[in-house]
């Protein structure tokens, strides 16, 4: 009886153990790697439990190779069985690309909509260039996505989720020691600036629509900002910013217009940058900042414009307008020139005509002194321009007539320079100083006109001289001809 | 009362015995026939050469050689020096007309077989002067140190560098180094105002002496009853009349189409589009462009240069291998060769000009 009872107990125990074994994992029956590693409680297997790949049914061996079906560690981790261990360097990208670049696996097997060119883009990106070790690319997939705890991008815990990405990028890009080995010239304060920017503040507050690193730089195919194909290359920046800022639907709720790109495109800066490909012209980031993007306020606008237009800004800051603008809280440059849609500043802006901006404040009755000054300055600059045009026309005429007029032509540069100077000097809003510059230009144009007129007179003189010389030569030729005839007639008579 | 000129003549005659020379000149006759007009082109060439020498000396008073000075000095001549523009323009136009007149003179001598015995040396010295005239043009073209001249010289010396065996040395000799630089300018200036005039004067002296000594050649078909006119004063006065007309043509061209100066040469600037040599080199330049890159195993350009060199040599030595003329027969083959050469040169020059 005791024996029977003992055998019964044995059977029960066996059933229990078998059941536990069967329950502890259906996994272990298929993936002995996870069975053992989870039993060990190591970090990779713990993280992998929540990994998107685990959810898709992928095993350790799909990345690490080997035989996951055998309990024998030696056999499972045998190189002959395809075990590669921990992929390193470019091996990581290769391991990921085995599935992520394969349409049959990604599309057919997993029904994925992820692009299949991520590995290719990474290899041609700035991160795909050779690292200082000389053996591998700078970054691999795991640097951003992690290795065993990879989550969907939309998962708030994912390292590449919009709200986490700035920190993920900053892991390397804010590390001075690390960055020095790859790109010493690249600043490492982007993350700090970003946190202070409008975009960064919104991102930190949980607004995943606010721009983060990938929105401007891209993700897998990031190129150097000096690369003409880069989304942050100067001529591409307006379009990159415009992806969000020109989308009225996307920008709804932020309380700012969405026509900046349209305005910028037709502005003097936009034409220079986008049509003439002048890299000296500002893109959005030159005024707003890039990582620390924030709209320049009333107090800083002249400083922002003054970065390039230094003389104008300096003259303005010392002018009587500075105080007046500050008192009325008017944005300095923007009040007269606008912001995104700044057009070429012509003489028309100055004066008291309908197109002029001065008369907006300096009305004839309420501010006659300013009105008269604006009117006088406009008259001066118009005179200089018309005199310069007259000089140019005379030089062109003399040149077209074949006269050597290079010296006068060279002086035209001084006249042009004086006109440019006068347009700058407008910002002093000092009629006397303005007149000095204009007078300098008028002096040069007078000299040029005089020289060009002398050349044209010389042109007529030369033709007159040629006419007289031709007449004299013709008379000589005819006389000589008659003389030859005369002596030949005489010779003929003599011969007879 | 004896006229002043007569007294002057007597004074000189008393010392150097001019009488013999005047008597010789008085007995000198020029044949008159349907091809007599071609005789005048030798005189026209001489007159244009005299203009070149005169205007060249005047330009020398202000011209400064050197990378930093040449362009500016020519600019100064054309804009500041009284009549400097005229002298420079006349020098440039007369240079081109001189080469044109030399071309015409050479072909007229060729077609009338005036090179035949006993005038072989006259022909050889004439051909030497023709080649010197081309080199005069080439060397003088660079002197203003402007953009077109700089690149044309670069192309021209590059072509010289293609000549097998000696090409590289010739190119370095012409440039005064590997590249066209200020050294090339100094060298071309030296050629233009010293070496070439010296050589040319020697050839011209021999050429004129032989023309005077041997007289004008008569066409082969003229026979013995050829009409003549006295060289002095008839032919000389006609020459003078033509020279006056040529002078007027040069003046008209110089005033109405003043020679442009262009932009100063910049070795770092890209070559201007459609760079071409002067018109008298254009037919060769255009031909080289048409020759395929490789003909059998020979480089096309090399072959072209060799063919032109051989043709030039054969042309120069024509008095020695023209057996038909030597035997008193009409060398029709040579006439056809000459016609082909003229048509070839004119058509390729026009094509080169238009392309």
Image: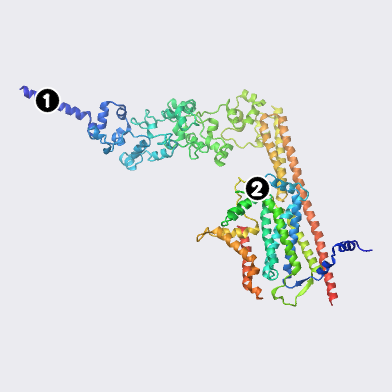
Q: Label 2 crowding class (10 Å Cα cut-off): few <14, some 14-19, many 20+?
A: some
Query: Which of the chains bears the disc numbered 1?
Result: A
Mark 1 vs mark 2, CA separation in Å: 111 Å
**Depth check: A276 or B352 in front?**
B352
Which x, y percent locates residue A135?
40, 36
What quarter of the picture does the C terminus of chain A occupy?
bottom right
- Colour approach in the figure: rainbow
What quarter of the picture does the N terminus of chain A occupy?
top left
Which x, y percent locates residue A15?
15, 27
Q: Residue at x 64, y 32 (%)?
A: A357
Q: Secondary structure at mark 1?
A: helix
Q: Which residue is mark 2?
A: B183
**Depth check: A268 or A56 in front?**
A56
Q: Residue at x 74, y 77 (%)?
A: B224
A106 w.r.t. A151: above or below: below
Give the side of residue B82 with respect to residue A126, left or right.
right
Q: Which label was assigned to residue A10?
A: 1
A469 w.r.t. B335: above or below: above
Which x, y percent locates residue B244?
78, 61
The mark lying in front, picked from 1 and 2, is 2
A12 w.r.t. B303: above or below: above
Residue extending farthest left: A1
Give the side of residue A89 with respect to residue A465, left or right.
left
């Amino acid at each position: 009886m005791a024996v029977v009872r003992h055998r019964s107990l044995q059977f029960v125990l066996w059933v229990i153990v078998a059941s536990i074994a069967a329950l502890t994992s259906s996994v272990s029956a298929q993936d002995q790697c996870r069975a053992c590693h989870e039993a060990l409680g190591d970090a990779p297997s713990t993280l992998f439990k929540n990994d998107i790949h685990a959810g898709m049914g992928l095993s350790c061996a799909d990345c690490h190779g080997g035989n996951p079906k055998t309990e024998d560690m030696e056999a499972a981790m045998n190189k002959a069985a395809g075990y590669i261990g921990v992929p390193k360097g470019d091996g990581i990208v290769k391991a990921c690309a085995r599935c992520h670049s394969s349409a049959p696996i990604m599309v057919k097997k997993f029904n994925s909509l992820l692009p299949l060119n991520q590995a290719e883009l990474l290899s041609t990106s700035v991160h795909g260039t050779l690292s200082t070790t000389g053996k591998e690319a700078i970054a691999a997939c795991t640097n951003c996505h992690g290795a065993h705890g990879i989550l969907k991008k939309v998962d708030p815990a994912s390292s590449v989720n919009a709200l986490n990405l700035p920190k993920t990028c900053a892991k390397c890009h804010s590390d001075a020691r690390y960055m020095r080995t790859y790109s010493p010239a690249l600043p490492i304060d982007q993350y700090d600036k970003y946190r202070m920017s409008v975009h960064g503040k919104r991102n930190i507050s949980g607004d995943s629509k606010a721009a983060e690193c990938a929105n401007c730089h891209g993700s897998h195919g990031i190129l150097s900002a000096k690369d003409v194909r880069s989304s942050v290359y100067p001529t591409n920046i307006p379009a990159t910013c415009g992806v969000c800022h020109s989308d009225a639907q996307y920008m709804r709720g932020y309380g700012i217009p969405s026509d900046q790109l349209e305005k910028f495109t037709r502005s003097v800066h936009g034409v220079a940058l986008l049509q003439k490909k002048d890299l000296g012209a500002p893109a959005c980031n030159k005024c707003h900042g890039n990582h620390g993007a924030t709209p320049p306020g009333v107090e800083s606008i002249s400083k922002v414009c003054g970065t390039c237009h230094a003389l104008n800004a300096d003259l303005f800051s010392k002018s009587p307008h500075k105080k007046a603008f500050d008192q009325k809280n008017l944005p300095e440059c923007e009040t007269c020139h606008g912001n995104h849609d700044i057009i070429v500043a012509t003489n028309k802006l100055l004066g008291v005509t309908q197109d002029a901006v001065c008369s907006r404040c300096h009305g004839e009755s309420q501010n006659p002194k300013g009105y008269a000054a604006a009117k006088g300055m406009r008259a001066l600059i118009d005179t200089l321009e018309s005199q310069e045009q007259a000089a140019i026309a005379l030089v062109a005429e003399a040149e077209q007539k074949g006269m050597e007029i290079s010296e006068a032509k060279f002086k035209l540069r001084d006249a042009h320079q004086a006109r440019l100077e006068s347009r700058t000097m407008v910002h002093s809003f000092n009629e006397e100083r303005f007149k000095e510059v204009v007078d300098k230009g008028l002096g040069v144009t007078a000299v040029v006109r005089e020289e060009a007129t002398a050349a044209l007179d010389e042109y007529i003189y030369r033709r007159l001289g040629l006419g007289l010389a031709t007449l004299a030569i013709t008379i000589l030729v005819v006389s000589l001809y008659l003389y030859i005839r005369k002596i030949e007639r005489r010779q003929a008579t003599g011969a007879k | 009362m004896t006229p002043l000129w007569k007294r002057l003549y007597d004074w000189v005659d008393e010392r150097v015995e001019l009488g013999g020379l005047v008597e010789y000149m008085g007995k000198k006759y020029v044949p008159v026939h349907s091809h007599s007009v071609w005789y005048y082109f030798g005189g026209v060439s001489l007159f244009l050469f005299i203009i070149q020498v005169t205007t060249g000396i005047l330009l020398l008073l202000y011209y400064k050689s050197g990378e930093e000075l040449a362009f500016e000095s020519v600019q100064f001549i054309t804009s500041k020096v009284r009549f400097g523009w005229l002298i420079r323009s006349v020098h440039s136009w007369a240079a081109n007309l001189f080469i044109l007149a030399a071309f015409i003179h050479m072909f007229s001598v060729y077609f009338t077989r005036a090179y035949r015995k006993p005038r072989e040396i006259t022909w050889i010295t004439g051909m030497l002067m023709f080649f010197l005239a081309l080199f005069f043009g080439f060397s003088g073209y660079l002197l203003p140190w402007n953009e077109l001249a700089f690149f044309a010289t670069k192309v021209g010396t590059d072509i010289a560098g293609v000549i097998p065996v000696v090409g590289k040395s010739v190119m370095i000799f012409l440039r005064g180094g590997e590249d066209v630089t200020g050294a090339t300018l100094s060298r071309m200036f030296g050629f233009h105002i010293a070496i070439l005039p010296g050589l040319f004067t020697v050839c011209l002296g021999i050429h004129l002496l032989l023309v005077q000594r041997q007289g004008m050649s008569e066409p082969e078909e003229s026979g013995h009853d050829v009409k003549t006119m006295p060289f002095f004063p008839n032919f000389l006065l006609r020459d003078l009349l033509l020279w006056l007309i040529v002078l007027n043509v040069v003046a008209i061209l110089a005033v109405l189409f003043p020679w442009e100066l262009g932009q100063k040469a910049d070795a770092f600037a890209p070559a201007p589009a459609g760079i071409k040599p002067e018109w008298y080199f254009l037919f060769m330049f255009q031909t080289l462009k048409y020759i395929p890159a490789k003909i059998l195993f020979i480089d096309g350009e090399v072959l072209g240069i060799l063919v032109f060199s051989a043709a030039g040599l054969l042309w120069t030595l024509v008095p020695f291998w023209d057996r038909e003329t030597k035997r008193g027969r009409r060398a029709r083959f040579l006439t056809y060769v000459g016609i082909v050469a003229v048509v070839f040169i004119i058509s390729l020059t026009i094509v080169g000009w238009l392309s």
